[in-house]
Amino acid sequence: MDEPPTDLRPTGITHDRQGHQLLITWNDGHESVYPLDLLRAICPCVSCRGGHDKMGPQHEPDILTLTPTHSYELRDMQLVGHYALQLWWDDGHNSGIYTWSLLRRNCACDACLAGRAERSG
């Protein structure tokens, strides 16, 4: 899995309620798309990952094969320092801290999905 550059920062973050997605524009000009169900499914917190030994990029779900089992709504979001975003979900969950590198690695725009599919086989 390619690691994004460490100097990436969002220049804009938009919650598209009608499209059921989060949109992020990055300082390198890339525009990322994140279906809300995907974001909830990749929550990086200890509870969702199943323990500290199952955390980190090597344990992230494969978004090419991910099938969400529930439709989630985003209730709120807040910046965490200069490195992440914390999301509040309609199921009450809010302990996941989504770092910029986690978000960029899991971009679901057509170009990023095609690149992942090409690299995986």
Image: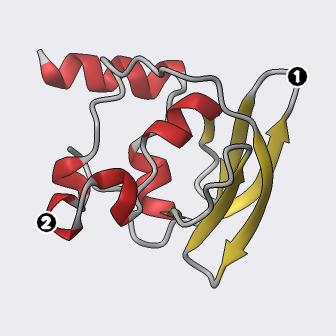
Q: Is residue 51 left or right of residue 20?
A: left
Q: Residue at x 64, y 23 (%)?
A: 71
Q: Most extreme residue toward the right, as rendered?
A: 18
Q: How many marks?
A: 2
Mark 1 sits on what residue? 18
Q: Position of residue 43 (x, y in %)?
A: 46, 50
Q: Amino acid at mark 1?
A: Gln
Q: CA distance from mark 1 to mark 2?
A: 37 Å
Q: Is residue 5 above or below residue 106?
A: below
Up/down of 91 relative to 86, above or below: above
Query: Residue 33: x and y, percent?
Result: 62, 32
Which is nearer the N-term, disc 1 or disc 2?
1
Name the residue at 43% across, 28% down: 112
Q: Residue at x 38, y 52 (%)?
A: 48
The C terminus sits in image quarter: top left
Residue 60, picture quadrant: top left
Left or right of 9, for residue 116: left
The residue shown at (49%, 51%) is 103
Relative to residue 75, is residue 38 drawn left or right? left
* Residue 119 x, y percent position in the rendering: 17, 25
Quick one: 91 or 17, which is closer to the camera? 91
Q: Nearer the viewer, residue 1 or 111?
A: 1
The residue that label 2 is drawn on is: 53
Q: Residue 95: horizontal and vertical position, in percent?
A: 55, 66
Is any atom of residue 35 visible in this view? no
